[in-house]
Image: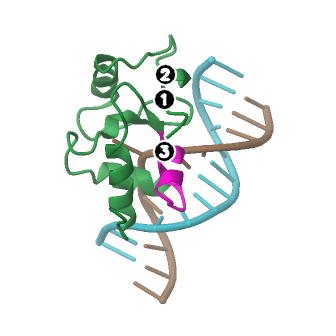
Chain colours: A green, B brown, C cyan
DNA sequence: CCGTTGACCAGGC
DNA sequence: GGCCTGGCCAACG
């Protein structure tokens, strides 16, 4: 628990994201007490396992998916989220209603 | 130690 | 509503 490394804290938060819900990088960064959302991005790209750390549940603040998803690309990420019940908008973005509001 | 890079975000056009 | 720019800040070599 209380990891001193930023990466470990980020991983812990991402792992706590329930199925069918998504979080923005800024949200994760804030909960992980990280200075900037960029660190979250670094951690995700260094993410060792998609099953251990569901980085596909982490999206942009606009609801856009991750450009250059480390496990196949945006296309794969979108299918995974849809499979988990996440709603997508016509413009190809995640519905803001799928964002976690209370944690 | 310093410079570059980057899975961000907010603002402007 | 979509695309571009600037700024913040940590990790990497």
Q: Mark 2 lies on which chain?
A: A
Residue A4 in sight in this render: yes
State the SS at label 3: helix
Co-location on one chain, circles 3 and 2: yes
Closer-to-camera residue (A56/A14) = A14
**Image quadrant where residue A82 sits:** top left
Q: Residue shown at 34%/28% (left/top)?
A: A74
Label 3 vs 2, first from the N-terminus: 3
Query: Which residue, given by chain and number where applicable, does mark 2 sit on?
Result: A93
Residue displayed at 37% across by 71% down: A4
Marks 1/3 same chain: yes
Residue A29 rendering spot, x and y as whole percentages: 49, 52
For residue A64, the mark is 1
Chain that bears disc 3:
A
| Residue range corresponding to the magenta coloring | A24-36
Q: Which mark is residue A54?
A: none
Taking B2 as reference, is A14 above or below it? above
Toward the viewer: A34 or A66?
A34
- Labels 1 and 2 touching (C-beta < 8 A): yes
Q: In the image, what residue occupies the spot 38% across and 54% down?
A: A10
The answer to whether C4 appears left or right of B13 in the picture is: left
| Percent coordinates x, y for residue A36 in the rendering | 54, 58
Output the chain of dot 1. A
Viewer-side label of 3, 2: 3
Distance of label 1 from label 3 (alpha carbons): 11 Å
Q: Which residue lies furthest to the top in this view?
A: A90
Marks 1 and 2, how far apart at CA: 5 Å
Label 1 crowd bin: few (<14), some (14–19), many (20+), radius 10 Å: some
- Residue B9 in the image: x percent, y percent? 60, 44
Residue under numbered circle 3: A25
In the image, C1 versus A40, the foreground residue is A40
Report if the CB atoms under discs 1 and 3 are less than 8 Å apart.
Answer: no
């Amino acid at each position: 628990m209380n990891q001193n490394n930023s990466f470990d804290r980020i991983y812990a938060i991402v792992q706590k994201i329930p199925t069918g819900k998504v979080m923005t990088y800024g949200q994760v960064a804030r909960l992980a007490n990280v200075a900037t959302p960029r660190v979250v991005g670094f951690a995700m790209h260094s993410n060792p396992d998609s099953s251990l750390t569901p980085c596909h549940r982490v999206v942009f603040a606009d609801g856009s998916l991750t450009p250059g998803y480390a496990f196949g690309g945006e296309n794969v990420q979108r299918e995974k989220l849809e499979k988990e019940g996440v709603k997508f908008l016509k413009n190809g973005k995640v519905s803001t209603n799928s964002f976690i509001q209370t944690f």
